[in-house]
Image: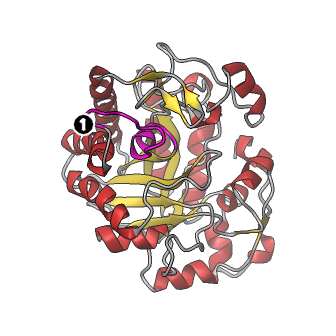
Amino acid sequence: MGSLALENRIVMAPMSRDLSPGGVPGADVARYYARRARHGVGLIITEGTFVGHPAAGNRPAVPRFHGVDALAGWAEVVRAVHAAGGRIVPQLWHVGQDPLVWGKSLEAARFSLPKGVEVFDPPGGLMSPSGVDPDGPAGREMSQSDIAEVVDAFARAAADAERLGFDGIELHAAHGYLLDQFFWNVTNRRTDRYGGDTAGRVRFTAEVVRACRAATGPGFPVILRISQWKVAHYSARIADDPRELESLLAPLVEAGVDAFHCSTRRFWRPEFDGSPLNLAGWVKKVTGRPTITVGSVGLKDSDYLGYVEGKGAQTDDVSLVAERLARGEFDLVAVGRALVANPDWPELVRRGRTDELRNFEAGMLTALD
C-alpha cells in the first residue's frame, strides 16, 4: 500500500474505547497498541480519532487528532508501536449527525449507549449532509463553507499523521458517520453538486481523499473504510450490485485511495447474489486496489449487537478466512474483538495454541491492557 510493506496480513481493527480523558491518549494507550504489535499484528489501525473540526466529535473520552497535547500523546503511541516492531495508522473520524443518537434526544441517547460512553452537543451542534437522519430532521445541513472546513480538517490531520511518523492513515467512511452519510441516499438528499446521483454523493469524500493526498508525500498510504450497514440499520446499502459499487468507488480510486477496509458484520457472507465474494472481494475485483476484510474473524455465534453486549465465543478455526485469503479474494484480515480479548492472538493461532484463547467480553474494551 503505497510505500508501506507489512510483515504479515493480520490487521488490528479499530475499536473505540473512550479511554482518553480530555481526548488525550496517555501512556496506557501506547502500551495497549504496542502490546499487540509485539505479539505479531502486522498493521494496527487505531480507534477512531476526531479531526480538528468543532463538530467532529461528541464524546469527551475519544482521542482527538488535533491540538498540541493530543498529538504529543499520539507521538508516544507511534514510538511505542515502532519500538515493538509494528506498523500503525490512525483512523481519522468525523461523526456528522452521530448515528449512535439517530432518532433520539441527547438525554435519551445517554441512557441507550454502552456503559461508560458519554456524549455532548459539540459547538454549533451536530451537522449532516441534509440535516436529516433516517428518522427525520436532525442536526443542520452542511453549507459549502462547512464542507470546505471539514475537508481542510482531514488534510491537516493527514499531514500531522505523517509528521508524527505514522505509517499511513485510515479515513472513516463507514457505519453511518459523516463521509458515509454523503454516500447513502437516505441521509444525503442534497440537490447541489454533493448530492443526487452516485457521482454527486461520492464527491465530498473524493475531495477529502484528494486533500489528504496533497497534504502528504506521494507514497504515504491512504486507506478508506467503507460499509454497507449503518449503526442500527444493518440492511442499509450504498450499492445494490457490483456495477453500482464500481461507480461509487472509481472516483475514490482516482482521488488516491491506496486500499479499502471493507466492514461487514460477518466476513463469510456473500455481498451480492450469484457470487460467493464478500464485500472486500468485490471491492478488490472492481477497483484493483488491495482490500482488508473484517467481520467476526475468530468469533462464532456472534453479531454486532453481541459486541456491545459482550457476547461471542472464540473459535479455534480460522481456516475459512485463511483459505479465502490464499485464493486472493482479499489481501489483509482485520481482527477486532478476538484481538482485544487476546493481545497475543497472532502468536497463539500461528502456534496452534487456540485452546488458550479467551472469550471476548464487553468489559475488555474498557480495560487498560
The x, y position of residue 324, in whole percent, is 51, 82
The answer to whether residue 181 is magenta is: yes
Residue linked to disc 1: 193
Q: Is 281 located above or below residue 200 in the figure?
A: below
Q: With 309 as the anchor, is 14 left or right in this view? A: left
- Tell me what residue is drawn at x 61 percent, y 42 percent: 16
Q: Nearer the viewer, residue 47 or 100?
A: 100
Residue 257 placement: quadrant: bottom left
**Quadrant of the frame with the N terminus:** bottom left
Magenta run includes residue 242: no
Please determine whether, in this image, residue 291 is positioned above or below residue 304: below
Furthest residue in direction top, as rendered: 124
Residue 252: x percent and y percent? Answer: 28, 53
State the predominant SS element of the stretch in magenta.
loop
Q: Nearer the viewer, residue 48 or 123?
A: 123
In the displayed structure, does residue 236 sit left or right of residue 201? Answer: right
Q: Amino acid at mark 1?
A: Arg
Residue 140 at x, y percent in the picture: 45, 21
Above or below, 18 relative to 327:
above
Can the viewer see residue 83?
Answer: no
Q: Nearer the viewer, residue 199 or 80?
A: 199
Residue at 31% in and 28% down: 147
Label 1 crowd (10 A; few <14 / some 14-19 / many >=20): few
Q: How many marks?
A: 1
Q: Quadrant of residue 106?
A: top right
Q: Is residue 245 above or below residue 49?
A: below
Can you give x and y, in whole percent of width and height, for residue 127 in the image? Answer: 46, 24
- Chain part drawn in magenta: 176-194
